[in-house]
Image (cartoon, rainbow, N blue to C red):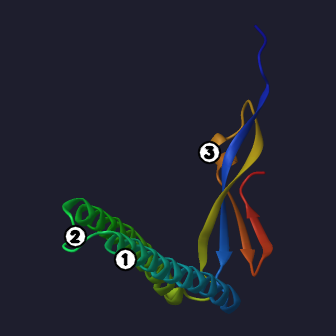
């Protein structure tokens, strides 16, 4: 059996950003766009639900038979459930906007996790090899921290 001297490993890389006015504005715009998209999806959901309910009511006799009433109830329940999911997402986005507003300029925050590969050899400090960060400011790499 042969002894392996080195090995390629996949490791997580933290992408940190330095908070700047430009970065805050861009992030807030992205979050606002997501909020607008959610509002549009909620409106579309309600509109589609109302159309489906109206269609069932048009096709049904008066008074509405139990089967049609059950269909309407089911549609309303689905709308309520999906709308609650959208509202939870919206609440989360509003919290993120608030958190971004509270960040101080020149503060570093983790924006994403990426992956890279590294070579480890006998005698290397594995903790140092696995602990790596890329720091950016307004899209430009400012620093690479850790053992490449």
Q: Which residue is mark 2?
A: 64
Of label 3 and label 2, which has the lower sequence position? 2
Q: Is residue 91 above or below residue 78?
A: below
Residue in the picture at 39% in, 78% down? 50
Counting every numbered tag in the picture gives 3
Q: Callout 1 environment at 10 Å: few (<14), some (14 to 19), or many (20+)? A: few
Q: Closer to the camera: disc 3 or disc 1?
A: 1
- Residue 3: give x, y in percent of width and height: 77, 16
For mark 3, what is the residue?
127
Q: Residue at x 34, y 66 (%)?
A: 75
Comparing labels 3 and 2, the label whose residue is closer to the camera:
2
Q: Residue at x 60, y 69 (%)?
A: 110
Numbered disc 3: secondary structure: helix
User: What residue did someone put label 1 on?
Assistant: 54
Dots 3, 2 in contact, CB < 8 A: no
Q: Is residue 53 above or below residue 107?
A: above
* Residue 86 percent coordinates (x, y): 43, 73
Residue neighbourhood size for the residue with mark 3, other residues' Cα within 10 Å, grouped as few (<14), some (14–19), many (≥20): few
Mark 1 vs mark 2, CA separation in Å: 12 Å
């Amino acid at each position: 059996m042969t002894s392996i001297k080195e090995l390629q490993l996949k490791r997580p890389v933290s992408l940190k950003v330095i908070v700047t006015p430009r970065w805050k504005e861009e992030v807030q715009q992205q979050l606002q766009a997501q909020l607008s998209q959610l509002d549009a999806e909620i409106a579309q959901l309600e509109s589609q639900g109302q159309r489906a309910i109206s269609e069932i009511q048009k096709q049904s006799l008066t008074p509405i038979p139990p089967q049609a009433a059950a269909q309407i109830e089911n549609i309303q329940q689905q709308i309520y459930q999906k709308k609650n999911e959208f509202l939870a997402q919206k609440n989360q986005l509003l919290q993120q906007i608030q958190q971004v507003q509270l960040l101080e300029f020149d503060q570093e925050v983790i924006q994403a996790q990426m992956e890279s590969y590294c070579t480890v050899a006998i005698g290397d400090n594995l903790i140092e090899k696995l602990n790596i960060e890329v720091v950016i400011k307004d899209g430009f790499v400012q620093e690479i921290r850790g053992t490449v």
